[in-house]
Amino acid sequence: MSTIRFLGPGLFFLISIGLLIFLDKSEFLFWPQLAIWVVYILFVVRSMLGDKYFYLSTLLAVQSIVFVFFTYIYQNQENVERITVFVFSAFTKENLEIASRASLFAVIPIVLVYFFQKKAEPQSSSMNQNIVEVIVGLLSRLSRISNKDGFLLLILSFSISFILFLTNVSIFEVSYPFNAHSLWVSPIYFVAFYALIFLPYLVFLAKRLTWPKASAKKLLTLSRINLIISPTLLLLIYSSRGLMAVAFFLVGSLEILLSAKKKGAWLFGVLCLLISLYLVQSFPYLRFQLAHSLESNSVVFAQSVERMIPFRGLDAHVGGDHLEVNRSINLNDYPMIGQSLFHMLYVVDLVKQANTLDGITFINLISQATPQVIAGWLGYERPLNDNWRLGLYYRHMGGFLAIANAYWNGGVWVMTIFMVVLSSVVMAIDRYFAKGNRKIIAVLGYWSLLPIFAVQLAYGIQGLVRVLQLVGLLILFDKFRFLNKKS
């Protein structure tokens, strides 16, 4: 094995050890190292994307953001506002330090697995393409769908969204999640509705890339407009926004990447990124306040937009003869990652009290793998989900950070082993789909499940494993098709 393959993980490991050493000792030495670490992670993510490891790069990006955020809160813990939605008895310096170190330990296996499982032989020419060429190649398969069929999909997706909006209770009338109780269609079908909305966009984008004629351009414009309107209608009746936030982030990134080659619309890409930011930062406020507020809806919306501004607590004013700065941090302004921080703090507190699950999470995955409907037919009750189990000890806002879920089963070493296994499985999935000659349905499923995979990293191991099970079924379906073709 060549020296180059050892240099990458060796350098990363040294920087990570430095971060662990100086986390609680010297800010002067810590922050420059963190900056180098972040730059290194960006290069690794770029390398993963070039190798078509899309799930693995997503896993690394999410866990790296978690580590940086946890560390930022640890270094600025005195500025965090004590709000009632979290139990601050677990918000101690010791617990924050353990949570920060554990989140770094969760990143290390991803990078090491990538370097050590990467194939030793030279990459094929298709693997050495830049990311834009890779995306164009993947989307080119969708261009086989006719303009007529793509337009029918677009009309169908808008019609379904509009009918659902008219026939269900929206957050204009009743706050989320209470309005969702009156839905006449099961929330589980909304994933299919969103996929139906994004499919015509991807079809016409593929046609625009591979067959740049005026008709494809006009239909792509219509599909982009539908991509804004239809998800908005659905979010107004079922306001679970995590999946859509990730989807809009991916679309925005895709458009900006393609615009570098004059193949995408950078302005639409920026709009999608802003929508993603709004859904993460501000939509939880809007979906609750819209029905309750006595003020006009426009005022409530303006207040929610204000929450998109990062570090709103950095309020500066002149006091006497000097500048006074209020550096307060309201974790409610960072809903998903803020609650993920407290998931980690809660389980750190529980493990310190010797209250661990001792592997029950992984044992229960077998019985939880059976769908609820089939479990009802068989007459047995599936084990309690771990996010509900955590709620028996601490009040939290839902979800369960996957690494915190693993940590609760025995501490940092169980969590590290879990990340090694998860990274290996995800890399194997990426490697399978990186090869050509995959059935288009399997490829579409692979891409459709990617944003769900990203969201499930903040919603517990059970949901994460469910996504991997679905991808595994896609692989089996594709292999069965391939075997039949050979025979």
Image (cartoon, rainbow, N blue to C red):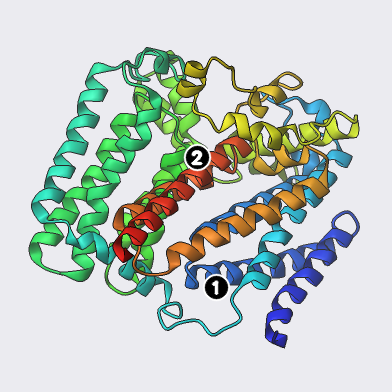
Q: CA distance from mark 1 to mark 2?
A: 27 Å
Q: How many numbered dots are placed on residues in this image? A: 2
Q: Nearer the viewer, mark 1 or mark 2?
A: 1
Q: Secondary structure at mark 2?
A: helix
| Residue 302 location, quadrant | top left
Relative side of 361 to 353, left or right: left
| Residue 268 location, quadrant | bottom left
Quarter of the rendering occupied by the C terminus: bottom left
Q: Sort mark 1 into few (<14), some (14-19) or many (20+) by Cα contacts within 10 Å.
A: some
Most foreground residue, 153 or 293: 153
* Location of residue 431 in the rendering, given as x and y in whole percent from the top left corner: 50, 65
Q: Residue at x 23, y 68 (%)?
A: 209
* Location of residue 383 in the rendering, given as x and y in whole percent from the top left corner: 64, 23
* Location of residue 273 in the rendering, given as x and y in whole percent from the top left corner: 41, 51
Relative side of 201 to 117, left or right: left
Residue under circle 2?
280
Most foreground residue, 15 or 372: 372
Most foreground residue, 267 or 339: 339
Image: 153 above or below 202: above
Quarter of the rendering occupied by the N terminus: bottom right
Question: Which mark, residue 47?
Answer: 1
Most foreground residue, 302 or 226: 226
Q: Earlier in the sequence, mark 1 or mark 2?
A: 1
Is residue 75 in view? no
Image: 426 above or below 123: above
